[in-house]
Amino acid sequence: MNTKVIFDTDPGIDDAMAILFAQASSKIELLGITTVFGNATIENATRNALYLKQRFNMSATVCTGANTPLNIAAGEPTTFVHGQNGLGDIELPDTLPIAADARSAHDFIIETVRKYPHEITLIAVGRLTNLALALQKAPDIAALVKEVVVMGGAFGHNGHTGNVSPYAEANIIGDPHAADIVFTQPWPVTVVGLDVTQQSIMSNDYIKALQDQSATYGEFIYQISRFYSDFHKESAGLDGFYVHDSSAVAYLLAPELFKVKQGPIRVICEGPAIGMTLCKTAEKVFPVDDWHNKPKQQVCTDVDSKGLLDLYFKILTQSPKPL
């Protein structure tokens, strides 16, 4: 049976690539795409999601989500990574013949989870504000969600600790209070952070091969990823780019590609380490311990990078699945 997925996202170049990964997989039924501020303005993020829906004939419902974090000021969209329009500044139409659903993202999440109890997997690859708002409005959904897979955070494995600050990853520092809420709820969360996403690199040759061999998605992915590749070359000296958001989809499709550890997770919400993610693995209860009464979650610590890249390529180059 296909896994029913709501994809919470701020498209975003790698977000778009991950959405197409999920859409192309025969194991995923993409029910919804909920948008959030981050890589782009909420307006551009929602427009980009609708553009993907129209261009690739998706049945997923698109809903507009949060435009600001829960408690801190919103940062600026990361246009230096994703371009002014969020999709690498490829040419996009001024208007689209389809519009977002009238429901807010968090209301759509609540309604869909209640409609399909224990069947919905939430894949969240942006700020976690929509998920936190859904939990605050309807705490009962925590017991009804099948699984939550988050691309975010950094726990120090493989030398990866942060990409916005020395200890914070972008999605988490963008709304640390929301992330702390999401990680401490009684639902199963797997965090796919920089620890593994920066272990996998899609080279320019890989993307060129995808362009040549994926009739449905290859040309689009090649075009949007030029800006992203240039950013990674300039900022990290890479020939290609890290596989951030698609790693979360890969975990859902093939968890055997990943090594994990378990423990309660908390997020630092103020001070110089704001946005830092910490997983407690010791069973001991300490004199000061705001972890001990929180549920154990999973953190990905390593990945079979070749297996992940092979999986993405295989799924994106297969025949399109029927609607």
Image: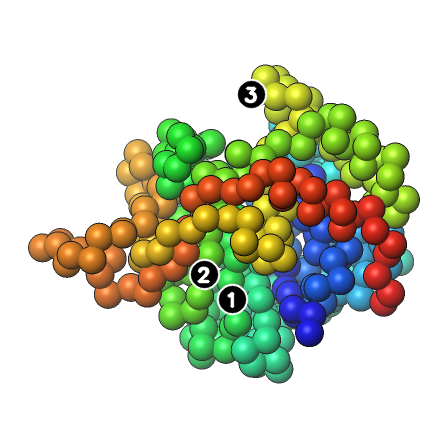
**250 on left or right of 184:** right
Estimate the spatial distance between the alpha carbons at disc 3 and disc 1, rounded to whole Å.
Answer: 33 Å
**173 on left or right of 224:** left
Q: Looking at numbered disc 2 in the image, what kind of residue is underneath it?
A: Val
Q: Residue 121 in the image: state x and y as whole percent.
A: 58, 66
The quadrant of the image that shows the C terminus is bottom right
- Alpha-carbon neighbours of circle 1 within 10 Å: few (<14), some, or many (≥20)? many
* Label 3 secondary element: helix
At 61% from the left and 51% from the top, the residue drawn is 250
At 55% from the left and 49% from the top, the residue drawn is 257
Considering only vertical position in the picture, is 126 above or below 101?
above
Estimate the spatial distance between the alpha carbons at disc 2 and disc 1, rounded to whole Å.
Answer: 6 Å
Depth order, front residue of 54/262: 262
At 64% from the left and 65% from the top, the residue drawn is 5
Q: Looking at numbered disc 3 in the image, what kind of residue is underneath it?
A: Ala
Q: Residue 30 in the image: state x and y as whole percent.
A: 71, 64
* Label 1 secondary element: strand
Quadrant position of residue 237: top right
